[in-house]
Amino acid sequence: MNFHFTPSPRPSSLEMLTNEQLLNIYELAVQAKASPEFIEIIEEVLSKRSLEHSEH
């Protein structure tokens, strides 16, 4: 089966977490060798927040 992740216009559960919570999940996901797709989604949320923060 071939799945493709399509972002929702609503905030995801990951986007509702604090930066600290998101970083903790990222570290645990890397340690647990979670799927590269899941880790990539977390990285995208973190980078988006970083860009938004640097624009202010």
Image (cartoon, rainbow, N blue to C red):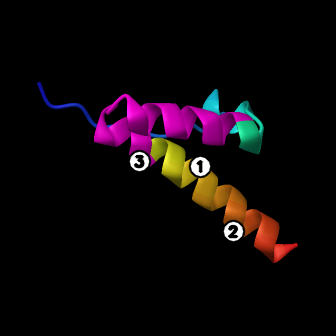
Q: Distance between the residues labelled 1 and 3?
A: 9 Å
- Dot 2: element: helix
Q: Earlier in the sequence, mark 1 or mark 3?
A: 3
Q: Nearer the viewer, residue 11 or 19?
A: 19
Q: Name the dominant secondary structure of the magenta segment.
A: helix
Please name the amino acid that badge 2 sits on.
Leu
Q: Is residue 9 left or right of residue 2?
A: right
Q: How far apart are marks 2 and 3 (CA)?
A: 16 Å
What residue is drawn where x is 42% and y is 42%?
39
Q: Mark 1 points at which residue?
A: 45
Residue 21: % across, % down: 70, 33
Q: Earlier in the sequence, mark 2 or mark 3?
A: 3
In the image, farthest residue toward the left: 1
Q: Nearer the viewer, residue 44 or 29?
A: 29
What residue is drawn where x is 32% and y is 33%?
33
Q: In which quarter of the image is the C terminus?
A: bottom right
Q: Is residue 7 left or right of residue 18?
A: left
- Residue 12 visible from this viewpoint: no
Tally the numbered discs. Answer: 3
Residue 55: % across, % down: 80, 75
In the image, farthest residue toward the front: 31
**The disc label shown at residue 40, or none:** 3
Residue 45: % across, % down: 59, 49
Q: Mark 2 points at which residue?
A: 51
Please name the amino acid that badge 1 sits on.
Val
Please say whether residue 41 is one of the residues in the magenta stretch. Answer: no
Label 1 crowd (10 A; few <14 / some 14-19 / many >=20): some
Please name the amino acid that badge 3 sits on.
Glu
* Residue numbers of the magenta segment: 21-40
